[in-house]
Amino acid sequence: MILLYYIEYNMVVCEFLDCKKKKLKYNIGRCNLCENDFCGKHRLPETHKCYNLEKERNKLIEQNRKELLDTKCTPLKIIKI
Ligand SMILES: [Zn+2]
Ligand SMILES: [Zn+2]
């Protein structure tokens, strides 16, 4: 009984709308950006249109830009005379 309960507890309806509608239960994983539970198919932020993905992406872009600005000595700036 305890084992059955344990399995049932771990089966969660995927938060992705299509899966949610069908009320399919999966043994799934959690998105670490929005902390919702998804099936294996929708676990990646890209596949469930994670609302935190854009935020996270902007953070990365901002980070990259800073890194680019920090490295000023690039071969592109060398002008041949
Ligand atoms: Zn799903
Ligand atoms: Zn997410």
Image: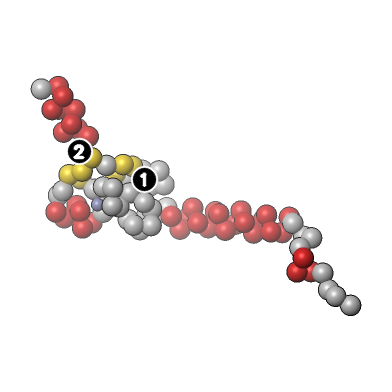
Residue extending furthest toward the bottom: 81
Left or right: 39, with 50 as reference point: left
Label 2 sits on residue: 11
Beta carbon of the mark 1 residue lies under 8 A of ligand 2: yes
Tell me where residue 2 sits by quadrant. Answer: top left
Instruction: Name the outermost residue toward the left.
Output: 1
Nearer to the camera, 19 or 41: 41
Q: CA distance from mark 1 to mark 2?
A: 15 Å
- The kind of residue on which mark 2 rests is Met
Pick whichever of labels 1 and 2 is earlier in the sequence.
Answer: 2
Q: Quadrant of residue 80?
A: bottom right
Q: Residue 54: x, y in percent?
A: 45, 58
Camera-nearest residue between 75 and 61 = 75
What coloring was used for the rendering? secondary structure
Q: Which residue is mark 1?
A: 31
Q: In this view of the protein, which residue sits in the foreground, 54 or 8?
A: 8
What residue lies at 26% left-to-right and 47% top-to-bottom? 39
Residue ranking furthest to the right:
81
Place of residue 32 in the rendered image (x, y in percent of width and height, measured from the top left) = 40, 43
Q: Residues within 10 Å of mark 2 (few under 14, many from 20)?
A: some
Disc 2 is placed on an element classified as: strand
- Secondary structure of the residue carrying tag 1 is loop
Q: Amino acid at mark 1?
A: Cys
Residue at x-position 48% and y-position 55%: 55
Q: Is mark 2 within 8 Å of ligand 1?
A: no
Tell me which residue sits at (16%, 33%) in the image: 8
| Residue at 82% across, 69% down | 78
Q: Which mark is residue 72?
A: none
Q: Is residue 49 left or right of 55 when viewed as pictured?
A: left
Left or right of 5 in this view: 80: right
